[in-house]
Image (cartoon, grey):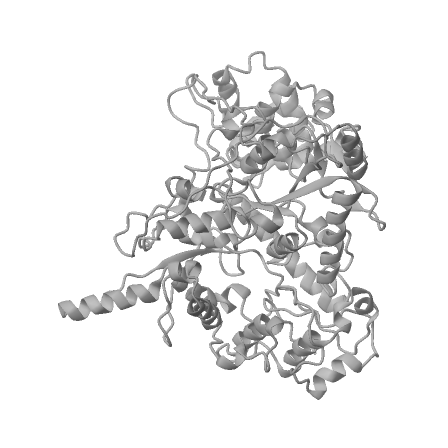
Amino acid sequence: MGVQGFQEYLEKRCPGAAIPVDLLKLGRTAGRQHHHPGPLPPPARILIDADSGLQRLYGGYQTDWVCGGEWNAMLGYLSALSQACLYQGGLELVVVFNGTLGKERWPEWARRAQGQRQTAQLIVNHIGSKATPPPRAWFLPPACLSHCVRLAMFRFRVRVVQTLEDHHQEVLALYRDFGFCGLIAQDSEFALCNVPAYFSSHALKLSWNGKNLTTHQYLLSEAARQLGLKTQQLPCFAALLGNHILPDEDLAAFHWSLLGPEHPLASLKVRAHQLVLPPCEVVIKAVSEYVSSIKDLGNLDAVARDVFNQSQGVKPPYRNALCGPGHASLFQNLPPLPDCNDSLSGTMGYMDWSAPYDQGGSRLTNHHTSAPSGPSHSPSSSSDGDEPNDSSHHLTDKSSGWDDPAGRGSGGDGSHGNGSGSNIPSLLSMATRSHMDITTPPLPQISAEVLRVAEHRHRRGLMYPEIYHILTKGEMKMAVCIEDDCNSELPPASLLFRAARQYSYGVLFSLAETHRHLERLAMRNRGPLEVPPVIVKEWSSGKSKSALTPELVPALCFREWTCPNLRRLWLGRASEDRSRRTRAFLACLRSDCPALLNPAQVPQHLLLMCCVLRYMMQWPGGGILQRHELDAFLAQAVSNQLYEPDQLQELKVQHPYYLTIPFPCTPPGNPSGPVLLTSAAESVITQSSGTAGALMHVSVLFASKRA
């Protein structure tokens, strides 16, 4: 999209619009400018968008990000980053993760997923042919990296929040309402919102001694001056560049008309009967000249006639496309982020991040709440909320908006009064969105208390984000994995773990309890057993399917035992409830075996890895893991050497295994534990001949079968 190219244009074509800064130095300066009665001034708060800054949070400037050693390097980097910000610069970090389903940006996500699959194939081919780490420009985050970084932030006592419906709007609302002093991100939409202190996440660099945290600060006012624009013209400029509301296809003719027939690129307008778009930097310059020539920005009908060549009275769809802080159209529908207490509030300082229990049900977009089946429960707890405050225009402390419940800012009514008649066709009415019309049977009704707990945990980052969307919408979106599409012997990751997800769906929708209830009802009425199917839409990009076509996956229930309902599993406090939760987890991975829960046989920190390995070994027909690969997993799990990144970097093995990373393993608490190593596994550790490389980094999502 055109708007996404603005960030690069800002860096390369606008000299003086990106200046180097040291965040720790700015934080120390801001702390000295305040005089508080306490011994230390309160830290200035910086908001980090993890969605666009994931590469830097993944160990800073890691050169070897796929072959081995990076998990411990990542933990060390995040620990150093959090400590440096707090103790060296007086900065408090708050990291916001993208927890939205993002269906309004579906075509954009599909195009990005297609590009990521091509990058994944390049990575696999590079490792297979050269046995060296892939170039840094090919960085593709492992499928679970965002969740592992989120858990690491909890470990280092960094505040975490997860968005729910619209990631960009909620990030900007947090920045505005809770008095943040800066936003670290790498997204053109944030840049065009004219955030007062907007910093680059891609340029973020922590020095080795932890005393300097350098990056670039973007000055949108300078970029606007060079483009000949005023601040109030930026929303119209951003909308006309093209975005998920006004896609490039709708604006292509307008962009070409701005260039004119005499432009050197005019001959590229039509080539082989395909839509050809002008280069991004050419579009940015042409649109800026057009917007600067508009005499009355309030007359959107006149702009619509220029853009779409339609009659007067058209209501342009870019009214709510992009607006900066202070424009009510961006924030008018955002829910408040009030206080909610839970078990982490005392230890981590969470006070302001989740929705209240007694208000969540009324705001949930749960389209199946009227379904007749399933039990319903009434709410049982509530809490009051803190309210927002205005944002800062400098790197200064604004703690009153964060801690003072009375510091509420006004958002305005956000109403606009001109334009009527037929709407301009957008992605919501284009044929490319017909995939959203796929209908599935209504989902079982979810307990209102369970939904409130799910939203609460989702906003606080305490839960895998797809769980909430499965419960409320019956849909989930899967990330692209680093796997070899050309290897026909191994199933794709989405297919390999589909059975585990199906059992998880059965647990989430209390399918076993529904079956038992319907069986009793059929026996009582002496009629046939009719169980309505529970179908979940799984969106993913694969070799043989489009990302815009979902897989309709039915939920399954366990045959061995009757799993309790979700409310009992989540909220039950009895000792047997904990045992049921553990058994449900093991059953989803086909590992409902008492021996796995015996610490004398399987150390607790290796339980997850053993369950995943057991699941993979049970794949029909086998062939997922060979014996030497299983030995490599076990050797990696019990070797102390493999948890030292420096030693791992220098380690040489005869046959290095390059496998994708699904999750970090906890360092073993008992190196000489009961896990027995075969001679093959021992040789993997002891042999030292061969070329340099990383040693068999464990994977559950993709396993290469190279010897």
- In the displayed structure image, the side of residue 141 where residue 573 appears, left or right: left
327 vs 173: above or below: above
Q: Is 76 in front, or is 417?
A: 76
Q: Is residue 266 visible?
A: no
Quadrant of residue 140 in the image? Answer: bottom right
Q: What's the residue at 80%, 43% (across, down)?
A: 88
Name the residue furthest top. Answer: 295
Tell me the quarter of the image containing the N terminus.
top right
Q: Is residue 690 visible?
A: yes
- Residue 152, how many percent across, how many down? 65, 55
Q: What's the residue at 75%, 43% (across, down)?
A: 85
Quadrant of residue 263 in the image? Answer: top right
- Residue 187, how many percent across, how many down? 64, 38
Name the residue furthest left. Answer: 525
Q: Is 187 in front, or is 169?
A: 169
- Residue 300, how many percent across, how many down? 50, 18
463 vs 214: above or below: below
Q: Is 635 in front, or is 231?
A: 635
